[in-house]
Image (tube, rainbow, N blue to C red):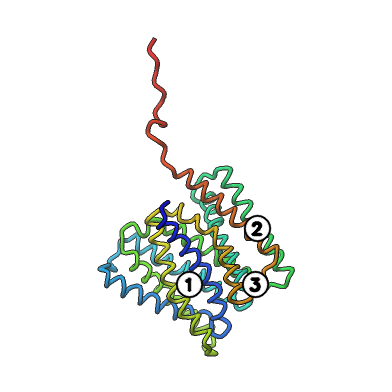
Amino acid sequence: MDLRAIGLGLAFAFMWSSAFTSARIIVADAPPLMSLSLRFLISGLLGIAIARAMGQTWRLTRPQWKSTFIFGICQNALYLGLFFVAMQRIEASLAAIIAAAMPLFVGLAGWLFLGDRLRPVAVLGLVLGMGGVALIMGSRLTGGADPLAIGLCIIGTLALTVATLSVRGASAGGNVLMIVGLQMLVGAAALAVVAAFTEDWQVTWSTPLIVAFFYTTLVPGLAATFTWFVLVNRIGAIRAATFHFLNPFFGVLIAAIVLGEAVGLLDIFGALIIALGILAVQLSKQAQARPVPAHAAEPPAKTVS
């Protein structure tokens, strides 16, 4: 892995993790689904405009269109929509920790439904990661965290898992930024329909709200998604997913610095366990994906007597 890939991975992890803090600021003063729909509309149009200026086309292949719709619904509408609603009731750090468990869910789902083989290290990683999630959930629930909001976050993470498993190879045919923009428009349309029937569109305008909205639109919304596609194209999805092990730390750290959220010892310990679990799962996948040298696959030569 070269230095550029490492830089891209660190940038992605930071931007992705910071989205929970900016979202927490937004939902305190504005309807969550309407705000998210507007964010996707702006991000999507910007992405498409930039993609067209770069010579990209919206004439995608059939697999790319399929991935665009699945990603738009599962990630943008379901995952982020449920998280935005939940963060009206729970802290950004807790939401970030739950979402950070996504690679563990992907590993488990791949084993259960896609026939992926898990090495002992990966099994250990899954057990560690899920144990860390359970530890933090138990600590927060006894501390008064809203169980319904936690449940929404878990469902949202499962939706993100489906999106991740469904878009393997989506960017193989090029037009990466166009795909990013189009899947955001899909999410914007789906969320707008739900928001029209479920939300009271009242906004308490403030400087933090405006700054958080534009930040989450341009940085986690557009830049992080594009960075992820570029990173996957450069080093592959399995190696790129290794950077997810940084998300629990970045998510908790940013929420503590910006929002002043309290971080307990169990939170830190649980985040460390989750990170180790994610790292173990991803390193195991890297080892499985590593090609076997040609000479190693050849049967031993017969000796002539």
Question: Which of 261 and 46 lies nearest the eye of the viewer?
Answer: 261
Crowd band around label 1 with a 10 angstrom C-alpha radius: few (<14), some (14–19), many (20+): many
Q: Give the residue furthest to the right.
A: 142
Q: Residue at x 66, y 62 (%)?
A: 268
Question: Which secondary structure lies at badge 2?
Answer: helix
Q: What label does residue 132 carry, if any?
A: 2
**Depicted 2 relative to depicted 160: above or below:** above
Amino acid type indicated by mark 1? Ala
Position of the C terminus by quadrant: top left
Amino acid type indicated by mark 2? Gly
Q: Give the residue furthest to the top.
A: 305
Amino acid type indicated by mark 3? Leu
Question: Which secondary structure lies at badge 3?
Answer: helix
Q: Which label's residue is closer to the chain start, 3 or 1?
A: 1
Q: Quadrant of residue 143?
A: bottom right
- Which residue in the protein does label 1 denote? 77
- Which residue in the protein does label 3 denote? 148
Q: Residue at x 44, y 58 (%)?
A: 166
Question: Which of 15 and 28 lies nearest the eye of the viewer?
Answer: 15
Question: Which of 92 and 161 lies nearest the eye of the viewer?
Answer: 92
> Marks 2 and 3, Cα distance to the nearest angstrom?
20 Å
> Marks 1 and 2, Cα distance to the nearest angstrom?
27 Å
- Determine whether label 3 and label 1 are within 8 Å by CB: no
Q: Nearer the viewer, mark 2 or mark 3?
A: 2
